[in-house]
Amino acid sequence: MITEHALITIQAGRQADFEQEFPKAKAVISQANGFIDLQLHQGIESPDTYLLLIRWQTLEDHTVGFRQSALFGEWRAIIGPFFASPPVVDHFTQL
Amino acid sequence: MITEHALITIQAGRQADFEQEFPKAKAVISQANGFIDLQLHQGIESPDTYLLLIRWQTLEDHTVGFRQSALFGEWRAIIGPFFASPPVVDHFTQL
């Protein structure tokens, strides 16, 4: 199991819209092979910054399986329009 | 409840020492008022980068209570020597 760590900056004034649409995006990514679960957090110091933590069975379930699937297009079509800049994505292993 | 999000870069070649000492630091911070739990993650793309996620009852339990306590000095004395640069710390609220 690995954790995808994504920092997402949302366009000014569009936070409420992003949060309203997010459950639809979650319903899409939840169908991906290897998806375990997801947490969405909002920044306290920077409320336009969101932290997305997604646990996957393997790294490749995210970087290959999901990103090359039709689900990725659906996911990005829902939340991508709110992004102020490309998300910063890394992966971690829990110790 | 809030989550402290800290990105820590460890000096090259000192990861194993840091990981070995970390349980002692965890035993210190676990005594702080408002501490709930802690996760330590290691970067896959950047193995010298660690992600520390600490849940606190309130923001001030971390920023005031812990940081102004003697426990903070003990915590930093254990893990600080391994840091390559100051940790980057933010706080988030889970949605």
Image (cartoon, coloured by chain):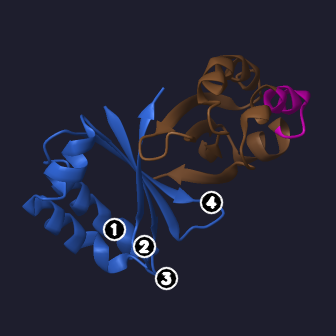
Chain colours: A brown, B blue
* Residues in magenta, as a range: A67-77
Which residue shows up at 50% across the image and 35% down it? A41
Q: Are marks 2 and 1 on the same chain?
A: yes
Compared across the picture, whether B57 is left or right of A41 comes to left
Which SS class for mark 2?
helix
Tell which subunit mark 3 falls on: B
**Residue B87 figure quarter:** bottom left
Q: Are marks 1 and 4 on the same chain?
A: yes
Identify residue for label 1: B20
Mark toward the start of the polypeptide (3 vs 1): 3
Identify residue for label 2: B16
Circle 4 Cα neighbour tier, 10 Å, few/some/many (<14 / 14–19 / ≥20)? some
Q: Which mark is residue B13?
A: 3
Q: Are marks 4 and 3 on the same chain?
A: yes
Tell which subunit mark 1 falls on: B
Identify residue type, mark 2: Ala
Q: Does the magenta portion include A71?
A: yes
Identify residue type, mark 4: Ile
Q: CA distance from mark 1 to mark 4?
A: 19 Å
**Residue A27 figure quarter:** top right
Residue A51: x %, y % from top left: 55, 41
Label 3–label 1 contact, CB within 8 A: no
Label 2–label 1 contact, CB within 8 A: yes
Tell which subunit mark 2 falls on: B
Q: Residue furthest left?
A: B70
Identify residue type, mark 3: Gly
Compared across the picture, whether B54 is left or right of A7 comes to left
